[in-house]
Structure formats: C-alpha cells, structure tokens
Image (spheres, coloured by chain):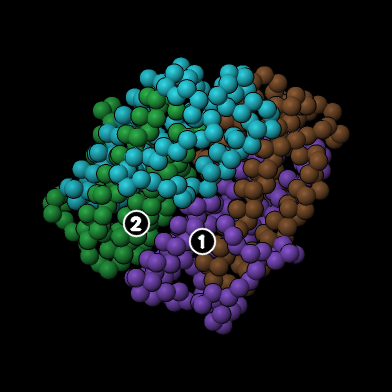
Chain colours: A cyan, B green, C brown, D purple
C-alpha cells in the first residue's frame, strides 16, 4: 500500500478521471445508502477514538490489536458495499463511471487486486 | 470478524486476563513508542473524517475505496508494530503478558490467525 | 474457509447451477487463455512437490513458509485472472453465467467477499 | 509477492542462513508432525490436479475459483502451523533458529508481515 497521505491526516483528494464531473450532486452507487454509510463511518471514527483512549490508558497490547481488527473488518465491509453499489450502478448504465464491459471489468478488477494485496 | 461493538462506536473495552492489573501505569510493549502510536491513530482518525467528507460530497466511489484502503494499510502497520513490541516485551520477560514459551507462542499465533482471516 | 474437501485430495466437484450445461465444450471466460492457465497450474503443482521435498529434507521452517507464500501468491493471480475473464465474459453477454446486472454484481461480489476473508 | 521461482516449478531452494547446518537430520519445529504435514501437502497436490481437470473440462469459472480458495485456505493453515511450531521450537531454545529475543521477534514478525501482504 503506498497511497500517499497528507500530513494532516486528511485523505489526499486527488481527482480520478470520473470524479470531477459536477461534484456534489451526482448520483453515485452509494447515494441510496448514503445515510447508512455515513453512520458506519461515524461509528468507525468513534472506534478509532476509543483505541486512542486504550493506548493512553496503557491497555493490554492484544486487546488494542483486537479493536484494530474490528475496525479493519468494519472498513472491509464498507469497501465491499461501496464496490457492490458502484458495480451495479455502472452495469445499469447510470453513468459517472466506465460504460463499456471492458472498462467496467478493468476498473472492478483493479480495485479487487488492490483489496487483495492489503 | 465478529467482534461485538458498542452502539456508540466506542470499542468494547472488555478486560483480557492480563489487562486488569493496575491499569494506567503499566509498562507495555508500546510504551516507548506511545507518542508515535497516538499520532498515527490521530492521523487515521483524520483520514476517516476525510472519507466522511468525500461521501457527503458525493465523490467517486472508487476514490473513496482507495482512501479506505489507505486507512486499512495504516491500521495494518499499527497492528504489526504493536504485535512486534508486545512479543519482544514478553520474550524479554518484562511481564504483563504470558511468561512461558508455550503461552507466548499460543498468544502470538492466535493474533496472527485472526489478522490473516480478515 | 470451510470448503469441504474429499479425502483423496480431489476438489469436490459439486455442480453450480451454471456448471452443468453441456460440460466439456462450453465457452468460458478462460477459454482463450486455457493453455496458459493449465501451465500455471502445472507449475504450482510442481512447487507443491518441491515443498514436500523440503519437508522430507528437514529444511528450515521459514524457508518452507516462504515457498508456501509464493504458491499462495501464484494462486491469487490465477484467481484474479479467472474472475476477470469471467466478469468480462458475462458482461459481454456470452452466456453460461448470470445475465442481469443484479445477478452479475451479486456473483462477482460474493466471490470477492470470499477472497477477502481468506 | 516476488519470490523468484524456477522455471520447472520447483521452489528455488535458496539456503537461508540457518538452513544449511547438517541438512537432513536436523530437529525442526515441525519434526514431530512431519507425517501430518506431508499428508496435508499431498492432499493439496491432489487438489491442484483436480483444479487442472476442472479447467480441462471447461468447468464453470466460479467453481474453479472456489476450489482455488479452498487450496489457499489449506495452505494458510499449513503456514500457521509451521510458524507456530517454529516459534515454540525457538523459544524453547531447541536451536537451528535465532536465539535472542530480538532476533526471534524480528524473524517471526517478518514472516507475519509477508503473510499479511498477500
């Protein structure tokens, strides 16, 4: 994994070739489940804060690792759900992503290959 | 992964058999790198907030997945570093964890098996 | 992973709902690269035999693990390549698999979820 | 994963620093379970042959991927079992591996990091 990350912790918001089009009001694969997605991310953020408190409190290493694993599992589910929504969105021809079978396959597979190698 | 998680997002702070002893001022495998660990977790928390903003801004799915992958990779490094510190700490006989070769091996391997199956 | 396996080591050849149709001369997502696929699998089989020889020769544990990791990486590439061929094949409407966007997405995502959890 | 592999499929039997000492009659972490290990590897070899037959028989892609996943899970278990045996063997001071806590930790963690990144 060599995603570059900004020093302030904010994800580097580089624009993909599709990302730029009229940002902010685009229909995405996750649009219908946006609230659920945001609440899962809020919960994950709370879990990270909890892990920080565990470190501050000198908690047992293995217990901290267990919590980190729980966060990773939660993030993995978010990833799968985003990819599923995106793939269906593209296959239904809803736009904003690749629109040929070849490009759709290439995009999904490159994400999957990346998810595999973590 | 079926770690139970409290509804408020805070990790469930269940006590492991070793965790309870005089919490708060125990020497842990991560004690010497605690500041570094906390700053990595703070950065990860910032990344999660950045991902929430991407969702709020209807950003491109694949770009969001990319950022989630970056967080997972960062968490994976934190996990490895915690496990490494813990294992060395135990092998050096610094206490707070298992103190026989059999128990030390069993503890490390159960964490590794869990990390593998994510 | 709890795939049941027959005792003789042969994969359990359970029929999926799509597998049964006129077996043996069906066009598959991997048909055009069948020779390459078979040669990769033959090489992997040779690697497994090499690992058996290492065990018989009491070779160093870590060196054996290294070879197993190489086999797993090779298998992972075969999996990705099969999935890519299959997805494209389905999206192009070549038959033998699911033919609605919903079913295609569900099939790919269930494979990906399984690959993730290994 | 960039383990180099010989063209004939045999794992490259490079010598690690520990591997060379009086090969063939050394006590290893897996010595007591050598028969079990060999029979698991023989079964895996049979599974690979079964996968080749599935490809030759034009079987359904997803079914082939399922079998590959079963092999990867079986290999993962072999890896964990080898690492566990090795770690215990080293911590008990049985020789043939690193003999300081620092070197033992470094060796185990480098294997784990490699297993994670597959």
Asked if both marks, 2 and 1, belong to the same chain, the answer given is no
Seen at 40% across and 41% down, the residue is A12
Neighbour tally class for label 1: few under 14, some 14-19, many 20 plus, Cα within 10 Å: many
| Residue located 53% across and 30% down the image | A18
Measuring from the top left, give residue B48's x and y in whole percent.
34, 36
On the image, the x and y values in percent for residue C62 come to: 52, 66
Q: Is residue D2 left or right of residue B100?
A: right
> In this image, D96 relative to B36: left or right?
right
Q: Is residue A12 above or below residue C23?
A: below
Front residue of this view, candidates A109 and A116: A109
- Which of the labelled discs sits on residue A88, or is there none? none
Relative to B106, is C32 on the left or the right? right
The residue lying toward the viewer, choosing from A29 and C40, is: A29
Q: Are marks 2 and 1 in contact (CB under 8 Å)?
A: no
Q: Is residue B83 above or below residue D18?
A: above
Distance from Cα at disc 2 to Cα at disc 1: 22 Å
Say which residue label 2 marks: B81
Can you identify the residue that label 1 sits on? Answer: D82
Q: Please, which residue is most extreme toward the bottom here?
A: D22
* Vertical side of B39 occupied by C29: above or below: above
Q: Is residue C5 visible?
A: no
**Is disc 1 placed on a helix, strand or loop?**
helix
Q: Residue at x 18, y 59 (%)?
A: B27
């Amino acid at each position: 994994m060599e995603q570059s990350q900004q020093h302030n912790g904010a994800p580097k918001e580089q624009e993909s070739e599709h990302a730029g089009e009229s940002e902010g009001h685009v229909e995405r694969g996750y649009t219908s489940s946006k609230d659920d997605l945001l609440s899962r991310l809020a919960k994950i953020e709370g879990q990270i804060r909890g892990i920080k408190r565990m470190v501050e409190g000198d908690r047992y290493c293995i217990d901290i690792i267990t919590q980190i694993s729980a966060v990773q599992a939660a993030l993995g589910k978010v990833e799968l759900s985003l990819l599923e929504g995106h793939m269906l969105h593209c296959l239904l021809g809803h736009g904003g992503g690749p629109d040929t079978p070849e490009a759709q396959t290439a995009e999904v597979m490159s994400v999957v290959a990346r998810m595999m190698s973590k």
